[in-house]
Amino acid sequence: MKKGRILVLIFCFLTLTGCGSVGGLDSCRTDPAGSKGLENNLPAYLQQMSGAHVQKEKNAVSVTIPSDLLFQPDAGSVELYNHADMMLLANAWKKYPCAKLAVDVFTDCKHSEEKNLVLTELEAWMIKQALMSCGIADGKISAQGWGESKPVATNGTADGRKANRRVTVTFESGKSLAAK
């Protein structure tokens, strides 16, 4: 009789782990990154972020945020002050725990190329640390600062420089990572 109860408990545990996140197991086995939900539901959720531009790609969803909404521009120190958007990103990831996050930070050409690269690397690291403090594992997040190397607008105008100061966070399913 005791063996029967143990088997029932094991069955219940295995059933629960297949439906959600119990004991570190999740639904990644059946639908890596929940790719259908990732592509269909995540963009609407991410639109809640301040100044967000959301883009759907095959097996990935990217959100681009002006870095001025996350970091104080032209401050004497670098400090992440928009914790609400970090929580929103973390909560979005918790809906798709098989996804990997790629954090990419860019800036304008206001300072030297070396200083801009160091600045964006530091900002990328700070975003990664903030997301990790919200419960996302280190191995699920990559962070890269690109300095001024990938502008999306001219650096000759104030509006162009503002557009170039941006953070892009990409939610990638396992399939898109394997293809890279």
Image: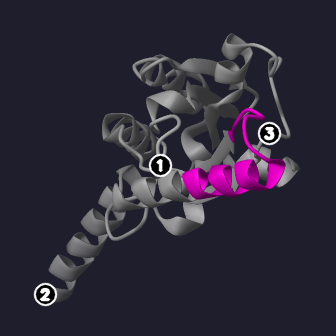
Identified by mark 1, the residue type is Gly
Image quadrant assignment for residue 60:
top right
Q: Position of residue 107 (x, y in %)?
A: 70, 36
Which numbered disc covers residue 5?
none
Name the secondary structure under disc 2: helix
Q: Mark 1 points at which residue?
A: 76
Q: Which of marks 2 and 3 is in front?
A: 3
Where does the N terminus fall, quadrant-wise?
A: bottom left
Which x, y percent locates residue 32? 62, 48
Residue at disc 3, secondary structure: loop
Q: Can you identify the residue that label 3 sits on?
A: 148
Q: Nearer the viewer, residue 141 or 113?
A: 113
For the residues labelled 2 and 1, the Cα–Cα distance comes to 67 Å
Q: Which amino acid does label 2 sit on?
A: Lys
Mark 1 → mark 3, Cα distance in angstroms = 19 Å
Asked whether residue 48 is drawn in magenta, I would say no
What stretch of residues is rendered in magenta?
106-124
Residue of label 2: 2
Which sits in the foreground, 81 or 62? 81
Q: Is residue 118 magenta?
A: yes
